[in-house]
């Protein structure tokens, strides 16, 4: 298990936040999740030319956009020249506002913001639109076509749940999966990312002080644990949620492991 914060998975970018490889973790029974195949990030609407060149080098075959229609319209992703990856998305809304923005509705303080995020994470597994695009995510991973990138708005909430589910499926220890989730708080230029979110929320969503907005722009172990608990309480286990709601049966699970785990 990983005991210290290792930030080597982050890729150097100028305007794409939180871009990193989420492979490399050991799995139960031996082997590791392959690297250079699984990437996660925030949106690419402000991507620089250097960022686009980097994305092009990843040779992506799938981009899984977990955002809803309104988010994609407000922040349309830039693509590099010659971009040929299949972009998967849900036609509709996946979370209303991005969860960290939804949690900021009304006048709240840091404590109520934290509680709101816990509650929202607990509700995310019941979001029909999000479940739909998560089904597409796992189908794409099972196809074995090559590298993929999954992202939402900030690359931390919906993306965090997607990645945590995949890590669980592959046999990554829950502590290592949590390590990957919490890496968002250590992303390069994290203060810039937080400042961007604070500028957006401060004038619009009712979160007025810095401490409150930092809660909303960060990740916390309690948040992810709330989603994990919701799956267990509602379906008996994350495995049952994967199979019953996301269509990851034994055959698809085996295909995903075959593609993504080095023995």
Image (cartoon, rainbow, N blue to C red):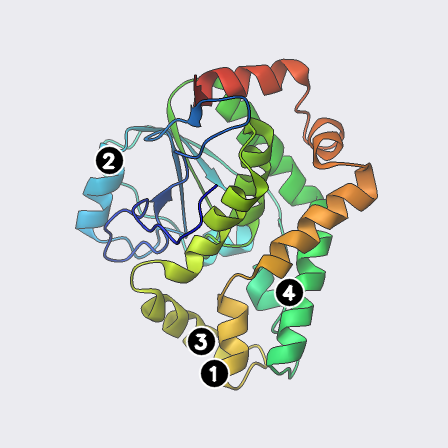
Q: Nearer the viewer, mark 2 or mark 1?
A: 1
Q: Nearer the viewer, residue 115 or 143?
A: 115
Q: Tell me if residue 41 comes above or below residue 200 in the rendering.
A: above
Q: Which mark is residue 56?
A: 2
Q: Nearer the viewer, residue 180 or 132?
A: 180
Whole-percent x, y for residue 179 in the image: 48, 49
Which badge, 4 or 3, comes first in the chain's sequence?
4
Q: Nearer the viewer, mark 1 or mark 3?
A: 1
Whole-percent x, y for residue 65 in the image: 48, 42
Tell me whether the residue at label 1 lies in contact with that at label 3, contact meaning CB atoms closer than 8 angstroms: yes
Q: Which residue is pictured at 81% across the width and 37% down the height?
A: 236
Which badge, 4 or 1, comes first in the chain's sequence?
4
What secondary structure is found at the residue carrying circle 1? helix
Inter-mark Cα distance, 2 to 3: 30 Å
Tell me whether the residue at label 2 lies in contact with that at label 1, contact meaning CB atoms closer than 8 angstroms: no
Is 21 left, or right, of 215 in this rendering? Answer: left
What secondary structure is found at the residue carrying circle 3? helix
Classify the position of the C terminus by image quarter.
Answer: top left
Which badge, 1 or 3, comes first in the chain's sequence?
3
Q: Which mark is residue 117?
A: 4
Residue on which disc 3 sits: 198
Which badge, 2 or 4, comes first in the chain's sequence?
2
Which badge, 2 or 1, comes first in the chain's sequence?
2
Inter-mark Cα distance, 1 to 3: 8 Å
Is 153 left, or right, of 107 in this rendering? Answer: left
Q: Nearer the viewer, residue 6 or 234?
A: 6
Q: Which residue is pictured at 24% across the width and 52% down the height?
A: 13
Q: Which mark is residue 177?
A: none
């Amino acid at each position: 298990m990983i005991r210290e914060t290792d930030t080597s998975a982050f890729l150097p970018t100028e305007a794409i936040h939180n871009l990193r490889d989420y492979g490399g973790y050991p799995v139960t029974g031996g082997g590791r999740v392959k690297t250079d195949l699984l990437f996660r990030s925030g949106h690419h609407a402000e991507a620089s030319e250097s960022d686009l060149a980097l994305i092009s080098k990843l040779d992506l075959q799938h981009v899984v956009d977990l955002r809803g229609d309104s988010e994609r319209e407000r922040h349309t992703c830039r693509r590099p020249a010659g971009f040929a990856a299949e972009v998967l998305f849900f036609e509709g809304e996946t979370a209303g506002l991005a969860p960290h923005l939804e949690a900021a509705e009304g006048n709240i303080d840091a404590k109520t913001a934290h509680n709101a995020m816990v509650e929202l994470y607990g509700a995310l597994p019941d979001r029909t639109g999000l479940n739909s695009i998560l089904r597409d995510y796992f189908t794409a991973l099972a196809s074995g076509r090559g590298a993929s990138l999954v992202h939402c708005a900030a690359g931390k909430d919906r993306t965090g749940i997607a990645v945590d589910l995949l890590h669980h499926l592959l046999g990554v220890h829950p502590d290592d999966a949590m390590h990957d989730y919490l890496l968002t708080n250590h992303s390069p230029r994290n203060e810039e990312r937080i400042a961007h979110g604070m500028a957006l929320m401060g004038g619009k969503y009712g979160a007025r002080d810095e401490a409150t907005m930092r809660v909303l722009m960060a990740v916390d172990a309690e948040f992810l644990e709330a989603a994990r608990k919701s799956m267990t309480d509602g379906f008996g286990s994350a495995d049952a949620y994967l199979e019953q709601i996301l269509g990851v049966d034994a055959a698809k699970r085996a295909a995903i492991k075959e593609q993504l785990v080095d023995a």
